[in-house]
Amino acid sequence: MSNCIFCKIANHEMDSDIVYEDEKVVAFRDLEPQAPVHILIVPKKHIATVLDLAEEDNELVGHIYQVASKIAEEEGIAEDGFRVVNNCNEAGGQTVFHLHFHLLGGRDLQWPPG
Ligand code: 5GP
Ligand code: ZN
């Protein structure tokens, strides 16, 4: 997707603070962090929303959670606790239509979220 900002970040066509990358995913710090640690984990493949995931993507989503845990350990937020969240469509708070998972931690997170 040529006009997708997360495709551009994944393809290194746009600057970001990348903390992890492999052949399937890239993880980078959110531009407007909502917690001391706020990292976005995105597949390199363009998938618009969680609704667009296919059966063949099951391994990819599992991999994203493995990466989230690894980064949480590295960022020192694993023991205290953290959150991995996906926003889907407008009422769900999605503003960028390239699938991404927020990894948030480093403070007490409220539940339920607003
Ligand atoms: P959503 O609201 O779609 O769940 O999350 C989109 C997230 O992407 C927001 O937290 C927003 O701050 C972040 N974001 C939007 N544009 C950019 C960008 O160009 N670079 C980075 N690093 N984060 C971005
Ligand atoms: Zn994209």
Image: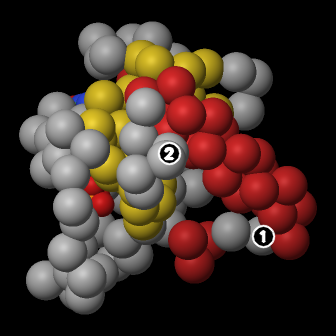
Q: Earlier in the sequence, mark 1 or mark 2?
A: 1
Q: Please determine whether, in this image, residue 43 is positioned above or below residue 74.
A: below
Q: Mark 1 points at which residue?
A: 54
Residue 99 at x, y = what percent? 49, 56
Q: What residue type is labelled 1?
A: Ala
Report ligand 1 position as a quadrant: top left
| x and y, in percent, of residue 93 in the image | 23, 73
Task: Look at the picture and state if 48 lies above or below 2.
Answer: below
Left or right, residue 75 beside residue 91 = right
**Residue carrying label 2:** 78
Please give left or right for residue 103 compared with residue 41 in the image: left
Q: Is residue 110 left or right of residue 2?
A: left
Residue drawn at x 50%, y 45% as measured from the top left: 78
Q: Is residue 100 visible?
A: no
Q: Which residue is drawn at 30% across and 29% down?
A: 29
The C terminus, quarter of image:
bottom left
Give the x, y percent position of residue 101.
46, 54
